[in-house]
Image (spheres, rainbow, N blue to C red):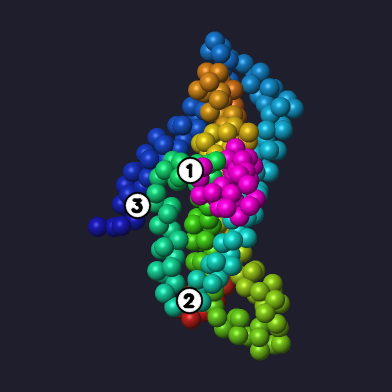
């Protein structure tokens, strides 16, 4: 039997999945974005989004997403590089990834206990003479917990990029007289940049739409696009405005995916670097 004739048949489950769980939900969100509270067609939702309130909200979301992504990358890249040099790198990588299997809500409540007024952090501050501090419901606690949650997702693609890096390219750099910093800047970083882009993609995009952590850790002192969508759907019951924010959030995510996409370079395949 000709396999080429069967290819369209094999694509049917994939097409059905995409149609039901990707295209249909997005189409529904776009449809609701043109409805007001009474269900009538309107463009006011889009006009409202471009007011100063939602503009500031969008800037705030991007700022916090940038901070979370920046600190995640700052910690993850050296960690991933160190893991590639260790003897049991896969085991250490597994130990880093395991916490990501734990339910997000459980980890969030764990940090409420850790950062609480009677938690271990404040107990340490009290013993050290600094005194009890309000750590919860602050920007610091929100960014700290978010970075902790996203670090495994940043480490994994960077580790894969570093692990695939052709070691002969690094040796050649040293042989040509480059020092460690120049080798990193001119060889290692450019050849692993797609791993960094993938990590940025899987961290920055979810960070834009965080809402549960903002509720429990930041105490609604940090407002993001995800929080605004939750409030519009569950509090004010304005599904039209909530859908409008979601439309722009999807648009932002699509733009970020375009910016962070790229071809893989520097990997070893059949003994040749690409």
> How many numbered discs sit on the rendered protein?
3
Name the mark nearer the viewer: 3 or 1. 1
Q: Earlier in the sequence, mark 2 or mark 3?
A: 3
Considering every residue shown, the one lying at the far left of the view is 1
Which quarter of the rendered picture does the N terminus lie within?
bottom left
- Pinpoint residue 200: horizontal percent, then vertical percent: 59, 54
Q: Earlier in the sequence, mark 2 or mark 1?
A: 2
Residue stretch in magenta: 118-145
Judging by the rendered image, the residue that carries numbered circle 1 is 113
Query: Is residue 266 one of those drawn in magenta?
Result: no
Label 3 – label 1 distance at C-alpha: 54 Å
Badge 2 marks a residue whose secondary structure is: loop
- Pinpoint residue 126: horizontal percent, then vertical percent: 59, 49
Q: Residue at x 43, y 68 (%)?
A: 92
Q: Residue at x 68, y 22 (%)?
A: 48
| Quadrant housing residue 232 | top right
Residue 105 visible (yes or no): yes
Identify whether 152 is placed above or below 238.
below
Name the mark nearer the viewer: 2 or 1. 1
| Quadrant housing residue 87 | bottom left
Judging by the rendered image, the residue that carries numbered circle 3 is 7
Badge 1 marks a residue whose secondary structure is: helix
- Pinpoint residue 193: horizontal percent, then vertical percent: 61, 64
Judging by the rendered image, the residue that carries numbered circle 2 is 86
Query: Is residue 124 one of those drawn in magenta?
Result: yes
């Amino acid at each position: 039997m000709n396999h080429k004739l069967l290819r369209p048949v094999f694509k049917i489950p994939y097409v059905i999945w995409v149609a039901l769980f990707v295209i249909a939900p997005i189409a529904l969100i776009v449809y609701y974005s043109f409805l007001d509270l009474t269900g009538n067609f309107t463009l006011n939702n889009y006009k409202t989004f471009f007011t100063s309130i939602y503009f500031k909200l969008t800037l705030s979301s991007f700022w916090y997403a940038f901070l979370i992504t920046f600190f995640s990358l700052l910690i993850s890249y050296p960690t991933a590089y160190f893991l590639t040099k260790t003897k049991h790198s896969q085991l250490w990588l597994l130990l880093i990834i395991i916490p990501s299997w734990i339910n997000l809500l459980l980890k969030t409540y764990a940090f409420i206990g850790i950062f609480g007024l009677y938690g271990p952090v404040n107990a340490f501050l009290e013993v050290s003479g600094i005194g009890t501090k309000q750590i919860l419901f602050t920007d610091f606690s929100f960014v700290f917990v978010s970075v902790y949650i996203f670090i495994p997702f940043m480490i994994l693609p960077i580790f894969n990029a570093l692990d695939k890096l052709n070691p002969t390219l690094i040796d050649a750099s040293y042989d040509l007289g480059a020092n460690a910093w120049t080798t990193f800047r001119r060889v290692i970083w450019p050849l692993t940049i797609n791993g960094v882009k993938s990590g940025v993609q899987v961290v920055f995009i979810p960070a834009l739409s965080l809402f549960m952590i903002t509720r429990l850790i930041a105490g609604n002192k940090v407002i993001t696009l995800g929080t605004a969508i939750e409030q519009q759907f569950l509090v004010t019951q304005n599904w039209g405005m909530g859908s409008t924010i979601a439309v722009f959030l999807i648009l932002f995510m699509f733009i970020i995916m375009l910016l962070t996409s790229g071809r893989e370079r520097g990997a070893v395949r059949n003994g040749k670097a690409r």
